[in-house]
Image (cartoon, grey):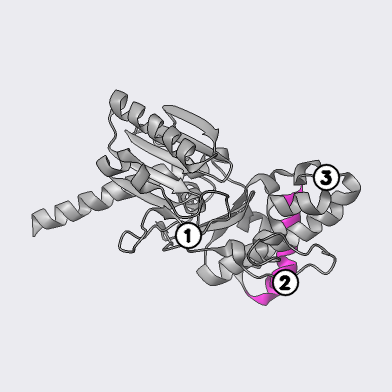
């Protein structure tokens, strides 16, 4: 059996799958992300129970960050400079006993979502996919040729400095940069500007709000596509649950990129290039499962190569 853990800024989803049916959760548990001690204890309880009843072949963890995912560097397995209160410099892997006993893959939550969507979701027909989430924060995960592009704290598109919408008077809510992408388009910035979340805006307010937010979402998609060459960008998160916002972002993409005559593939068909998650709310946890599967397959390939040598 393979366990997948998605640790988000507001909630944790733990899942268990049989490798023969990797998109079906045999068991799952969801709970709020609170303090590191309480949250990590809840994850470990799920894992110990799963291990005792089914046995575990591998574990995948997709966590909010920034997170150090490079085993060769100091502080591997740490959630590092996160703005989430109480979580900066949390030794996540070190505090999970199961991770010391079971082969464990670690990646960021959005990288997990990108991998899940590329493997089984909206990007399963292409090899290179990005997943952009707009929720408590803004994050982007990238999969190129079926492999996650990540390192010690990157990619970190949430703190990208973007061109401000000319009608956006909000100063920005990022505690580090003010009006970076996260400071302008994350859920807390929506709440600070308009007094409610994106799904409950008054119709008179929603038109301008969607234009502003769609402009920033489109800039995110363009920046990711220009810099990585992905063939599709999946967008999700709580902000994108507002009906009509995804279509506005699609409308804004040619405005940001210059349209089809600019000569880049991302402007050809925004409705095909920017898509909603195919796995719904399971993108991250299934991406963690996919990462664990890749870990096992890589280990098997190395073992085979050594045997042949």
Which quadrant is the C terminus positioned in? bottom left
Residue 234 percent coordinates (x, y): 58, 52
* Structural crowding at the residue carrying mark 2, measured as other residues with C-alpha within 10 Å and reported as few (<14), some (14–19) or many (≥20): few
Kindly tell me whether residue 291 is visible in this rendering: no
What residue lies at 48% left-to-right and 29% top-to-bottom? Answer: 29
Indicate which disc residue 59 carries. none
Q: CA distance from mark 2 to mark 1?
A: 26 Å
Helix, strand, or loop for circle 1? loop
Instruction: Using the image, determine if residue 53 lies above or below residue 258.
Output: above
- The residue tagged 3 is 201
Q: Which residues are magenta?
A: 243-263
Left or right of 97 on screen, residue 289: right
- The residue tagged 2 is 163
The secondary structure that most of the magenta stretch takes on is helix
Mark 2 vs 1: CB contact within 8 A = no
Front-lying residue, 309 or 60: 60
Residue at far right of view: 204
Helix, strand, or loop for circle 2? loop
Left or right of 185 on screen, residue 69: left
Which quadrant is the N terminus positioned in? top left
Q: CA distance from mark 3 to mark 2?
A: 24 Å
Number of labels in the image equals 3
Mark closer to the chain start, 3 or 2: 2
Instruction: Using the image, determine if residue 11 lies above or below residue 52.
Output: below
Residue 162 percent coordinates (x, y): 68, 70
Mark closer to the chain start, 2 or 1: 1
- The residue tagged 1 is 128
Helix, strand, or loop for circle 3? loop
Left or right of 193 on screen, residue 87: left
Q: Is residue 181 magenta?
A: no
């Amino acid at each position: 059996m393979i366990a997948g853990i998605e640790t988000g800024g507001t909630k944790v989803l733990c899942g268990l799958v049989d490798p023969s049916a990797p998109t079906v959760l045999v068991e799952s548990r969801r709970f709020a992300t609170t303090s590191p001690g309480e949250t990590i204890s809840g994850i470990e309880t799920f894992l110990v129970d799963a291990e005792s009843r089914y046995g575990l072949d591998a574990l995948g963890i997709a966590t909010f960050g920034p997170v150090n995912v490079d085993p060769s560097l100091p502080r591997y397995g740490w959630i590092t400079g996160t703005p989430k209160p109480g979580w900066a410099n949390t030794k996540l892997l070190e505090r999970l006993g199961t991770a010391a006993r079971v082969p464990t893959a670690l990646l960021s939550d959005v990288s997990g979502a990108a991998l899940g969507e590329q493997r089984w979701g909206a990007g399963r027909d292409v090899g290179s996919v990005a997943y952009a989430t707009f929720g408590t924060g803004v994050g982007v995960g990238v999969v190129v040729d079926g492999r996650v592009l990540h390192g010690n704290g990157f990619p970190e598109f949430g703190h990208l400095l973007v061109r401000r919408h000319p009608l956006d008077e909000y100063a920005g809510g990022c505690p580090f940069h003010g009006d970076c992408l996260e400071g302008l388009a994350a859920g807390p910035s929506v709440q600070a500007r308009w007094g409610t979340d994106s799904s409950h805006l008054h119709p008179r307010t929603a038109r301008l709000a969607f234009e502003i937010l769609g402009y920033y979402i489109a800039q995110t998609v363009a920046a990711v596509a220009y810099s990585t060459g992905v063939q599709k960008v999946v967008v999700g998160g709580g902000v994108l649950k507002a009906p009509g916002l995804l279509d506005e972002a699609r409308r804004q993409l040619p405005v940001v990129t210059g349209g089809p005559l600019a000569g880049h593939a991302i402007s050809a068909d925004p409705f095909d290039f920017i898509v909603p998650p195919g796995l719904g709310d399971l993108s991250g946890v299934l991406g963690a499962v996919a990462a664990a599967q890749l870990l096992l397959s890589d280990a098997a390939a190395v073992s085979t190569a050594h045997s042949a040598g």
